[in-house]
Image (cartoon, rainbow, N blue to C red):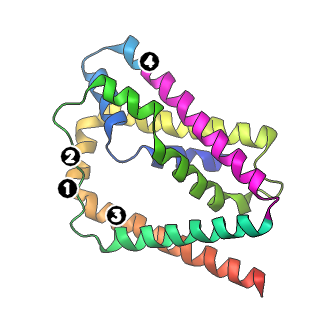
Amino acid sequence: MSLLGLPIGFYGYLFPGNINIMVMDLYNLKKYKVLFLILVLVLVFESIYCFFSLHYINKLRSSTDFFTIIELIAYLLILSMGLWMLWDAKSKVKIANKNNLYRGILSIIVHPQQISFWIVMGIVINPFFNSGLEGSTLLGFLFFNALGTLLIMSLYMVYGNKLLQYFKFKIHQLNTLVGVFFILLGLYSLADMIISFI
C-alpha cells in the first residue's frame, strides 16, 4: 500500500505554483546545477513534512476520541473541498509572469499548507494500513511520494508550457473531475465512520 504515496506526491504539485513554475523556468534557462539542488531541496522538505505529519497522526491514534474528531474534520474538509471545486465554475489558475528564485525556495522550506495537506491525506490513507504507517511501511510511502513529486516536476520541466496552457483553458473540467472524486471519497469515508459507530 506504500504505492499510494505515488499519486499523492504527483497530485500535491500538479497545480501551477511558485515551486513547479520555478523548476520549469530553471530547466528552460538550462541552469541544471541549480535545478538539481532545487529538486533535492523539494524532495527533502516534502519528505520531512510528510514524515512528521503522518508520524503525528499515528501518535494521535492512541487518543481515540481526539483522533475521531480530527478524522471527522478531515472527511468534512474533503467533502467541502469537493463541493467547492465542483461548483466553482470561475476558478482560474493565476500564473505570474516572472517567478523569483528566492520566492520559490522560500515556498519549499516554509510551506504551511503542507502540514494541513498531510494531516488530511494521512487520515484518508490510514484505513489502508492495518498496523499504521510506521517503520518500513512509512519509509516505502515516503519513497513513492518522492517519486510522484519527481514525476510531476519532470513533466513540468519537459512539457511546462503545454501544462500551463492546459490549466489555463481546462481548469474547470479538472476541478469538476477532482471535485466529484473528493465528494465520493468524503461521503464514503463519513458513511463508513458512521456505520462503525452503530
Q: Residues within 10 Å of mark 4 (few under 14, many from 20)?
A: some
Q: Nearer the viewer, residue 188 or 103?
A: 103
Is residue 129 left or right of 176 when viewed as pictured?
A: right
Q: Which residue is mark 3?
A: 175
- Neighbour tally class for label 1: few under 14, some 14-19, many 20 plus, Cα within 10 Å: few
Residue 184 or residue 101, whichever sits in front:
101
Q: Earlier in the sequence, mark 3 or mark 2?
A: 2
Q: CA distance from mark 3 to mark 4?
A: 31 Å
- On whether residue 37 falls in the magenta region, the answer is yes
Whether pointer 1 and pointer 4 mark residues with C-beta atoms closer than 8 Å, the reply is no
In the rendered view, tell whether residue 38 sits above or below residue 46.
above
The kind of residue tagged 2 is: Gln
Q: Position of residue 74 (x, y in %)?
A: 58, 65
Q: In the rendering, at what x and y percent does residue 156 appear?
A: 34, 35
Q: Which disc number belongs to residue 126?
A: none
Separation of disc 3 and disc 2 at Cα? 15 Å
Question: Could you tell me the amino acid type at mark 4?
Answer: Phe
- Secondary structure at badge 4 equals helix
Disc number placed over residue 169 in the picture, else none: 1
Q: Marks 1/4: CA distance?
A: 30 Å
Q: In the rendered structure, find residue 36 and report the number of the disc placed on it.
A: 4
Q: Secondary structure at mark 1?
A: helix
Mark 3 residue type? Asn
Foreground: 46 or 57? 57
Rendered location of residue 140, percent (x, y): 71, 38
Q: Cα distance, mark 1 to mark 2?
A: 6 Å
Q: Nearer the viewer, mark 1 or mark 4?
A: 4
Residue reaching furthest to the top: 33
* Residue under the point 20% across and 52% down: 168
Mark 1 to mark 3 CA distance (whole Å) = 12 Å
Q: Which residue is mark 2?
A: 165
